[in-house]
């Protein structure tokens, strides 16, 4: 076998290392990824969050492959991308549009330090967070400085050639791995905290009293373990004292608290037919599709699931479907809709029926065939339902 000089030069000084808790990091990053904001004017921030998460993943991959300085650089980038997100979202709409255009065109744009200075002196939300969470942000500043030492290669231990000298090769890399883990953990926490400058829902939804008063949303709550690990008890306690958090909290807490059975419908599209009385007592807290689904599924024990929009939205119940495998294929729904037979179509081991009423379209999955009397009752009742629901439009 001939000597591969190019491969030798590319890999000679690399020192691959193992991050033992990599899988844990990736699972925790998913918690941030699921905290999408529903703010209509801040949808672009979700892209910044995803990019910051990818930079953390890239850094771990780079580190394990021996590119340790690039790994620290990628961690620092995650902080800068997250800060850019906050900077843009804190600007007034017209100013944001202008600055975003500069950013897209790679024109003159504030550096990290300039953005932080602007946010502290000109923007209430971030300035309030930084003041209330001063201990957290002071620690984060030290982490940023620590990253800079690696990025700017200060000290011979940041040199590939120095770490590979004969006298150093036999030394373990525990110090470098420990430093990388410390910085990674803090950068993950920083993304999570800077996400909270957009809106407080990832923390608000951790509170059962708030969760039970909110509609279904894109945002998933941070877990208790995640907060404890990456932000800290004191850090999150300080965040809950910010003006933005308190304003959201005080507004939402005035809403009516949903019963668990109603919350299941709103959040998970699950209808417990055994709790019908409880559900009907708060029917005013349900939307139009929720109400139709509840009333239709309550008409017969045969009904297991209800589908809207050719299966894009569906509700399931405590009546388990007799179908052995759950799958959704919109083509099946569309074919039934186009056919001359809308009732009692075989659907694997179950049946699927399509009903149109007052401009609405509904697919009902049922475990046994409907009788003609049941079909007539459905049609009559659904017409009454739509008539009653006009007040919800």
Image: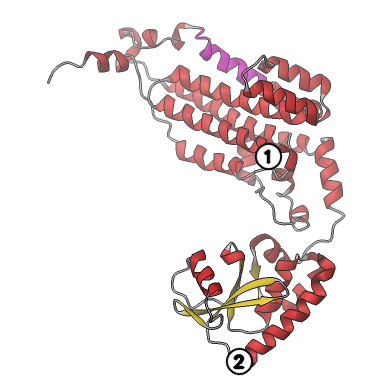
Residue 332 in the image: x percent, y percent? 49, 69
Relative to 267, 352 lies left or right: left
What residue is shown with label 2?
372
Instruction: Place residue 105 in its image quadrant.
Output: top right
Helix, strand or loop status at disc 2: helix
Q: Is residue 145 found inside the magenta-colored segment of the image?
A: yes
Quarter of the image for the N terminus: give it.
top left
Q: Earlier in the sequence, mark 2 or mark 1?
A: 1
Residue 111 in the image: x percent, y percent? 67, 15
Query: Residue drawn 17% across and 15% down?
Result: 3
Residue nearest the observer in this picture, 260 or 287: 287
Q: CA distance from mark 2 to mark 1?
A: 49 Å
Residue 170 in the image: x percent, y percent? 32, 15
Label 2 neighbour load within 10 Å: few <14, some 14-19, many 20+: few
Residue 29: mark in rendering: none
Residue 43: mark in rendering: 1
Which residue range is magenta in the image? 141-154
Relative to 113, 76 lies left or right: left
Helix, strand or loop status at disc 1: loop
Quarter of the image for the C terminus: give it.
bottom right
Label 1 neighbour load within 10 Å: few <14, some 14-19, many 20+: few
Query: Residue drawn 50% across and 9% down?
Result: 153
Residue 209 in the image: x percent, y percent? 78, 55
Tally of numbered tags: 2
Q: Is residue 351 above or below residue 334?
A: below
């Amino acid at each position: 076998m001939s000597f591969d000089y190019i491969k030798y030069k590319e890999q000679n000084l690399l020192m691959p290392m193992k991050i033992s808790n990599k899988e844990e990091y990736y699972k925790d990053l998913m918690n941030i990824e699921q905290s999408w904001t529903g703010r209509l004017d801040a949808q672009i921030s979700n892209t910044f969050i995803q990019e910051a998460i990818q930079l953390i993943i890239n850094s771990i991959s780079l580190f394990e492959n021996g590119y340790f300085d690039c790994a620290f650089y990628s961690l620092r980038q995650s902080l800068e991308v997250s800060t850019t997100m906050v900077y843009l979202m804190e600007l007034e709409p017209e100013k944001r549009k202008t600055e975003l255009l500069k950013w897209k065109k790679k024109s003159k744009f504030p550096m990290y330090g300039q953005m932080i200075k602007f946010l502290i002196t000109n923007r209430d939300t971030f300035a309030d967070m930084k003041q209330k969470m001063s201990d957290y942000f002071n620690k984060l500043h030290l982490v940023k400085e620590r990253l800079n030492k690696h990025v700017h290669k200060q000290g011979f231990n940041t040199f590939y050639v120095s770490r590979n000298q004969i006298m150093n090769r036999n030394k373990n890399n525990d110090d470098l791995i420990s430093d990388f883990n410390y910085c990674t953990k803090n950068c993950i926490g920083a993304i999570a905290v800077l996400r909270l400058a957009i809106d407080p829902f990832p923390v608000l939804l951790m509170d059962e009293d708030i969760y039970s008063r909110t509609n279904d949303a894109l945002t998933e709550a941070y877990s208790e373990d995640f907060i404890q690990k990456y932000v800290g008890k004191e850090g999150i306690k300080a965040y809950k004292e910010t003006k933005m958090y308190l304003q959201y909290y005080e507004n939402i807490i005035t809403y009516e608290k949903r019963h668990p059975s109603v919350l299941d419908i709103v959040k998970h599209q699950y209808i417990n037919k055994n709790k019908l009385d409880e559900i009907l007592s708060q029917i005013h807290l349900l939307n139009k599709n929720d109400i139709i689904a509840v009333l239709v599924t309550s008409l017969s024990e045969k009904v297991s699931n209800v589908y809207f929009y050719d299966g894009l939205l569906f509700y399931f119940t405590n009546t388990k479907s007799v179908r052995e495998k759950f799958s959704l294929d919109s083509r099946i729904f569309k074919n039934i809709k186009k056919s001359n037979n809308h009732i009692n179509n075989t659907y694997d081991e179950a049946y699927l029926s399509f009903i149109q009423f007052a401009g609405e379209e509904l697919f009902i999955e049922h475990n046994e065939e409907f009788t003609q009397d049941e079909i007539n009752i459905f049609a009559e009742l659904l017409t009454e339902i739509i008539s009653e629901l006009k007040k919800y439009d």
